[in-house]
Amino acid sequence: MQTQRHDVPEQPFDAAAQAEAGISRLRQLSMKLAMAELEIELFDTMEPLEAEWRRLERDDLSSLHQSYDWCSSWVAAFRRPLAILRGRCGTHTAFILPVEIVSSRGMRIAKFIGADHSNINTGLVSDAFAEDSGLLDSHKLAARLRTALAGKADLLLLQNIPLEWRSRRNMLAGLPMVQNQNHAYQLPLLDTFEKTLQQLNAKSRRKKFRAQSRRLEAIGGFDYIAPEASSEQHELLDMFFHLKSARFASLGLPDVFADAQTKAFLHGLIDKRNGDDFGLEMRALRLKGDYEGRIAALSGISRKGDHVICQFGAIDEDLIADASPGEFLFWQMISSLHGEGVALFDFGLGDQTYKRSWAPIETDHHDVVLPISGIGVAAGAAHRAITRGKAFIKARPGLYKFAQNIRAKFG
């Protein structure tokens, strides 16, 4: 009986693939070892961490809102208890989560410092830890965070986190989360303003810009101003508070900028500068001619690395409202940032028509909801339910408009 022989073709040896697989296994082993020795320490002051903090924040992909200067300005104004979390592997700092304790209805909630006025949160992560964050054991991380915060907080609530930011996965992405009802909107800045406009409906936008320009020239013209003097910056910020207060009152809504602490915090940011980076800088549209010296629109922007965030804006509704001065100011700001090393203009959180008209990128945000105590379990469930309810309403324009009318009527 003759036996047939079937030769299996020999697979070619792929050295590159083998090397890549080996590197992957080493990285997985490295991350397992890192998690095994990861220790999380709690700090109730910022100062002991300043050197490490400033080193980590040099990473362009870390949020401005977790920078040392931003947080120190908030802490100086609000003076809430701090519970700053530092993750350490041996002598190496893996991450810093700048957290404060907010008391609400008998619960202690651990939140990012200044969370109520931040547009994007990432935490601070070392390059090595960030690179391998996809291999992180999130269950072990959650357990260590609970242990670190035990007795200090009932709930860890870290809001407005993009799961991926500019192609980097967030190290917190595997923790228990709920999608935030608010999204953020960004415009990439290309080599020239003309190229940037090509991402949008450039023809329509230029037509609208020409109509706005003619309207402004008809009353005597305008100046786009970005004052260098600190005193002028502070004056413009006070004008913003005045205009925004009037706007909220006309809508029957609470003024989120009314309290003295918030005003002190924002004034403190104006004097926080580090090279090209700045905590807050005011830009404005100042009229000439018939309304000589009057401010028609103003905005506050922040910069970290190549990322500029519009923190807020306001217009004087008694002046040339038909010229859409707020949108005209965006044109001036965005065009002026070209050639300044800026790659991304961020319109921040909240769905507004003007943001969608300017921004081709929409970024989902999520909230970490990690109960620490028994009462935290109930609080976390409530936050999830409320957040999902808000998202449901916002996704339905008719229902959202009805909810806004109810809010304006009853506060």
Image (spheres, grey):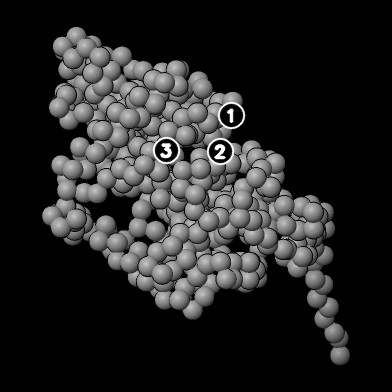
The span from disc 2 to disc 1 (Cα, nearest Å) is 9 Å
Residue found farthest to the bottom: 1
Kind of residue sitting beneath label 2 = Asp
Residue at (65, 40) in percent of width and height: 54
Mark number displayed over residue 264: 3
Q: State if disc 2 and disc 3 touch (CB < 8 Å).
A: no
**Residue under numbered circle 2:** 69
Label 3 crowding class (10 Å Cα cut-off): few <14, some 14-19, many 20+? some
Q: Is residue 257 above or below residue 306?
A: below
Secondary structure beneath label 2: helix
* Depth check, front residue: 101 or 361: 101
Q: What's the amino acid at mark 1? A: Asn
Q: Amino acid at mark 3?
A: Ala
Tell whether 367 sits left or right of 16. Answer: left
Q: Which mark is residue 274?
A: 1
SS at circle 1: strand
- In the rendered image, residue 366, in percent from the top left (x then y), is placed at 45, 58
- Residue 342 % position (x, y): 51, 29
How far across and down, in percent of the image, does residue 200 sit? 34, 33
151 vs 127, left or right, is: left
Whether pointer 2 and pointer 1 mark residues with C-beta atoms closer than 8 Å, the reply is yes
Q: Please tell me whether residue 283 is drawn above or below residue 145 in the rendered image.
A: above
Above-or-below relation of 66 to 37: above
The 10 Å Cα crowd at callout 2, few under 14, some 14 to 19, many 20 or more, is: many
Q: Is residue 98 visible?
A: yes
**Dividing the image into 4 quarters, which one contains the C terminus?**
bottom left
> Is 51 or 268 nearer to us in this picture?
268
Mark 1: give few (<14), some (14-19) or many (20+) Cα within 10 Å.
Answer: few
